[in-house]
Image (cartoon, rainbow, N blue to C red):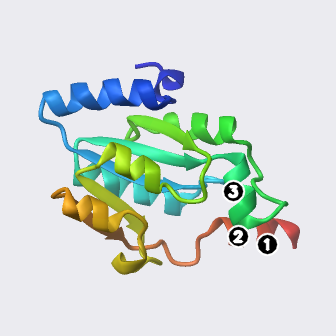
Amino acid sequence: MDVAEKIVGLTELDRLMQHWRGVGDSIVFANGCFDILHVGHVSLLNHCAELGDRVVVGLNSDNSVKKLKGDSRPINNQDSRALILASLKNVDAVIVFDEETPLELIKHILPNVLVKGGDYKESDIVGADIVKANGGKIAIVPLVAGVSTTNLINNIKE
């Protein structure tokens, strides 16, 4: 599959998931802003690939990043962020969402595994209850110490 073809809308994602589930693949879902891709993001996505067969990334739109992080963000626009994520070998699909949380996307996808970074508790993970009620699992992946987009931005400013 061409890299750009991994960036999908809901209709194409449905088609892909129907095919993947039809051949018995499990679907892992992770989401985030992925503003300046760093080793922590790559580590998270590599863990995702170990937890199932197909990795779907929900990517916050530029609008939702601004709501979450402020007017100075994102640094990279959603098209750039989506293409960078889609270029990673462990990512099977990228879908951009405009809401502040991926709740509606999680309800739609009903992944087998929902993944978040180690700065979350399961009780704080949006959609965890829905995934578990559907027989799925929640995975919390350890953070890479000292690595964050905010730290990178602050270091660049210095």
Front residue (pair 142, 27): 27
Image quadrant assignment for residue 115:
bottom left
Badge 3 element: helix
Q: What residue sits right under mark 2 in the picture?
A: 150
| Image position, residue 108 (x, y; %) | 36, 44
Label 1 is placed on what type of residue? Answer: Asn
* Image quadrant containing the N terminus: top left
Front residue (pair 32, 154): 32
Does the residue at mark 2 contact the one at mark 1 (Cβ under 8 Å)? yes
Residue occupying the point 27% across, 59% down: 131
Q: Is residue 79 above or below residue 66?
A: above
Q: Find the residue positioned furthest to the right.
A: 158
Category of crowding for the residue at label 3, using alpha-carbon neighbours closer than 10 angstroms: few (below 14), some (14–19), many (at least 20)? many
* Image quadrant containing the C terminus: bottom right
**Mark 3 or mark 2, which has the lower sequence index?**
3
Q: Is residue 61 left or right of residue 59?
A: right
Q: Is residue 131 left or right of residue 153?
A: left
Q: What residue sits right under mark 1 in the picture?
A: 154
Category of crowding for the residue at label 1, using alpha-carbon neighbours closer than 10 angstroms: few (below 14), some (14–19), many (at least 20)? few
Check residue 65 in the rendering and tell me which mark sits there, or answer none. 3
Badge 2 element: helix
Residue occupying the point 12% across, 35% down: 24
Measure how far apart labels 3 and 2 are at the Cα level: 13 Å
Image depth: mark 3 or mark 2 in front: 3
Label 3 is placed on what type of residue? Answer: Val
| Image position, residue 142 (x, y; %) | 39, 73
Label 2 is placed on what type of residue? Answer: Thr
Residue occupying the point 65% across, 46% down: 61
Front residue (pair 71, 38): 71
Residue occupying the point 15% across, 28% down: 22
